[in-house]
Amino acid sequence: PATFDLQKNVMVPPNSLIADQTMLQERWPLVIESLKKLALDQCIGKLDSKIGILTSGLVHETIKHVLEDAGLLSEVSLYKSAGSFPLNESQLLPWLKGLEKLIVIEEKRGFLEAEVVSLLQKEKLSPSLFGKKFDGQDGFPAHGGLNYDIIATKLLPLLAREAKHIPTCTLEQSLPRRLPTFCPGCPHRETLSVLKEIRTELDKEGLKLLTHGDVGCYSLSFLPPFKEMHNLSAMGQGGALGAGVDLFSTNPSVVLMGDSTFFHSGLTDISNSVQLDHDITYILLDNDNTAMTGHQMTPASGLSVEGKERPRQSMLQVARALGVKETLEIHPSDRYFYKNLLLNFVKRPGVKVIVSTKECALTFHGKQRAKERELFKNDVKKEQVFYNINTLACEDCRACVDATGCPGLTQTMDAYGTKIAIDPQVCVADGYCTRIKACPSFEEVIVYDYHPTKYKSLKGPGELEISAPAESKMSLADIAAGKEMRIVVTGVGGSGVTTISRVLAAAARNMGGREDIDFKYVDQKGLAQRNGNVTAHLTLFPKGRGATPVTPSARADVLLSPDLLDGAQHLGFLSPTGNVLLDASYQVPLSLILDDAVAAPLTDEASIRTELTQKLGERLELISFKELSQAILGKSVYASAMVLGAAFQKGLFPFSLEDLRDALSEAVKGGEGKTNLQAFEIGRAVVALGEKKVRDTLIESEDRPSEMQLLKLSLIESCAAWEDSKKLLKVWGQSVASLQELFKDISEEHLAQYVHDLLIFDRGAKLSEFHELCKQISSRYEASHQAQALRTLAKTFFIKDEVFVAHLMLSPQKRAHDEARFKKLGTSYRYKFINRPSFDLGSRKIEFDLSPKMWMLKSMRHLRVLRKLLPTWHAKEKLLASQIQKNLMSVPAKFDSNEIRQELQKLENVKGYREVRYKKAETYGVNP
């Protein structure tokens, strides 16, 4: 320290003035001199051309690619400046002096252009300049980035060439967007769900809750279904924005702040709020991780960056030390307590701090899976909890999705249209969806002696004889000779897309030992690492050529995706001769489930497959990768490796089998690597032998009763000792036959389900009336609308009350579905039903939580007499059913087909249990 030059190190006046002078008079000339010596600027093309293109940074490679494709690189001079500031005038100036036309291309704002203009003016040079403006018109955009297509469109006309337009392939139908969302089990979802609910409560009191955001995973809060973030500017600014708004608003304010943000800069916001006595509630989201940047530790973790144990810094204690009087730590899964606490806190004056403590789902479940992998090597798990949705009881009201936005909730179809279901490959069984208690369809399933594969007769790809792959459509020799190959991989984050792209990048790096081929690889994730879209681009090209890293429109030779929807959304990359390999199904996006389908009909897998086949023909291959992966390997995530194997077998890659196997082993380590190699071989087998052969060989066939058999058994089981099941079955058969005469385009199973449900509900007391209205539906509506009208009509003849739902919980249809899912996961399983019955006793409503036993359900399903004893029970549902029937029979004949569809959709959307149904009726104008 005694040797330190304090005048240089301590920046206070007059030292700061001296430092400024030193920088400009001594250090800056050294920078200029260093630039001259290093001579880092590069110039290629026709060096003495009168037309020069000046650029800097990554965009240079894309410009080079555009010029090479247009055959112009030998006609113009392309200059790459090592930096935008300062310019190396000793290299740049001689080049500028020989130009008549100067084109400056850079991303974002024109910093390089401004420096060059200043230099031109100083040297009294006046070439024609084209940059952010072309003769007063818009030039290269300053917003967003620059890609191949933008540069070609803007640059080539300046060089007297027309930008070549290659027609892209797109689907006519509108495809739903796949928005990024919180991971399954994410604790932030629980906080946002509570915020959304108390917002509704506060609205009734005339209060409009203001929610201020910050930077972190929870920045996704602004997206549907929550929309619980009204502003976001920079890290640590949520509290500052809240403080500013508090001065001008009488509405309560909440600040969402992550634990990492709190320690970064957020605690100063709280200090300021305490100092100025704001009326504001801080919710500190403590997930024990800096999750958004890769799960680094926080000061609360008790570990340093070096991995040393350090004191845990408590956010709660820090807040108290800052002078916050009301502080509380809660577990966000305790929904009831959290809701009441937050509702109380936000209405009280002063600064309040709630610390919501629950570990990040990715790290928590990652550790759980690691433990289970070790356990399952030699043992079983005594109990494993799963969650299940009884789709028979589900009304498709989507209250669970609207309240949680969980990607573990998906869609399925039955006789009544779409229903909500659990996606077992996404769900982490945190159980939060069950706490909404909007309906009785949720249930807990406890599997005993659980093991994911022990009880299944799984066979490996060794059972199959796989032939040699097809000849590569483009070989490494073709690429070395001048061709360019582009592969685009896209899909849902977390489904293994990154695995495919990593494997291809590893194979490209090895390249069979070749030195004459180069490659570029880019992985585009953004906020979509989980449940949003992830896309990777791989380009192989002759060494020395230019290549833009992101695939230009209509230039991909291969498009791969383990998801039908994501693949279809990226057809714009596909070249007119490119090949497409997709899964035959998609992971249902949240946007699709939240869409009420009134404005426009929703797409489905079948319509996407049909249009893809029509447009692409033999260039398209659709295979049920996820379904095969689940059935053979126990998890659908291995579908990505199957896609890789299938693409190789079809000759879509230039790599050898050894290269890909080595790359797969390199990219995926341990036991997962072995399973992915199996999946790779199964993918090859599907192409070589056909999907049916692979199914027949590797999947154990099971005899499952038909839907008609299950419905018949359901009717028999529903009969009490005093009832004649044969008579009931006869009525059922005759009624179904009668409906078949009216509706020839509707499946027998669906018609049978409608009649079955009327017979279960009240033994068909209104069956004759139902048939009369069915005749009107048949004559009033054209065939394209009949299915929707009929299922809407059928639902008006029964109410899913506690009596009816009791049978649905015991139904043979449900048992068959559950057996298929749970039977081979353990030695046995049992249910814990999650129910909240409601009864109207006079003017009083009684509701209570109940997990009914089987004997209770068996008794309850026969107590139809309760409907007579409780005449006001579900009275509003009866009125709504009657009104829907009237509306069905009065849709104006003058309406066109789409208007009729919209009216039918509104009527069908009146669904759900109790208050949910009432609110939807109000929303869609069904007023009895």
Image (cartoon, rainbow, N blue to C red):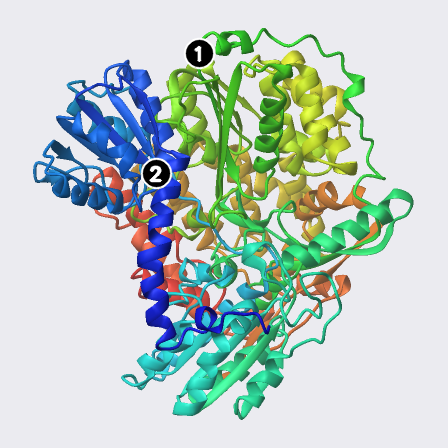
Q: Nearer the viewer, residue 290 or 394?
A: 290
Q: Nearer the viewer, residue 264 or 26?
A: 26
Q: Is residue 789 left or right of residue 166?
A: right
- Disc 1, SS: loop
In the picture of the structure, the residue carrying the numbered disc 2 is: 785
The picture places residue 241, in percent across and down from the top left corner, at 35, 75
Tell me what residue is drawn at x 53 percent, y 13 percent.
516
For disc 2, the neighbor class at 10 Å (few under 14, some 14 to 19, many from 20) is: some
Residue 702: mark in rendering: none
Tell me what residue is drawn at x 48 percent, y 57 percent.
398
Place residue 653 in its image quadrant. Answer: top right
The picture places residue 519, in percent across and down from the top left corner, at 51, 24
> Is residue 723 at least partly visible in the picture?
no
Tell me what residue is drawn at x 71 percent, y 24 percent.
662
903 lies above or below 641: below
Total marks in image = 2
For disc 1, the neighbor class at 10 Å (few under 14, some 14 to 19, many from 20) is: some
Tell me what residue is drawn at x 38 percent, y 28 percent.
61
In the picture of the structure, the residue carrying the numbered disc 1 is: 483
Q: Is residue 153 left or right of residue 775?
A: left
> Is residue 163 at least partly visible in the picture?
yes
The picture places residue 657, in percent across and down from the top left corner, at 68, 16
Say which label, 2 or 1, has the lower sequence index: 1
The picture places residue 246, in percent across and down from the top left corner, at 33, 83
Query: Could you tell me the amino acid type at mark 2?
Result: His
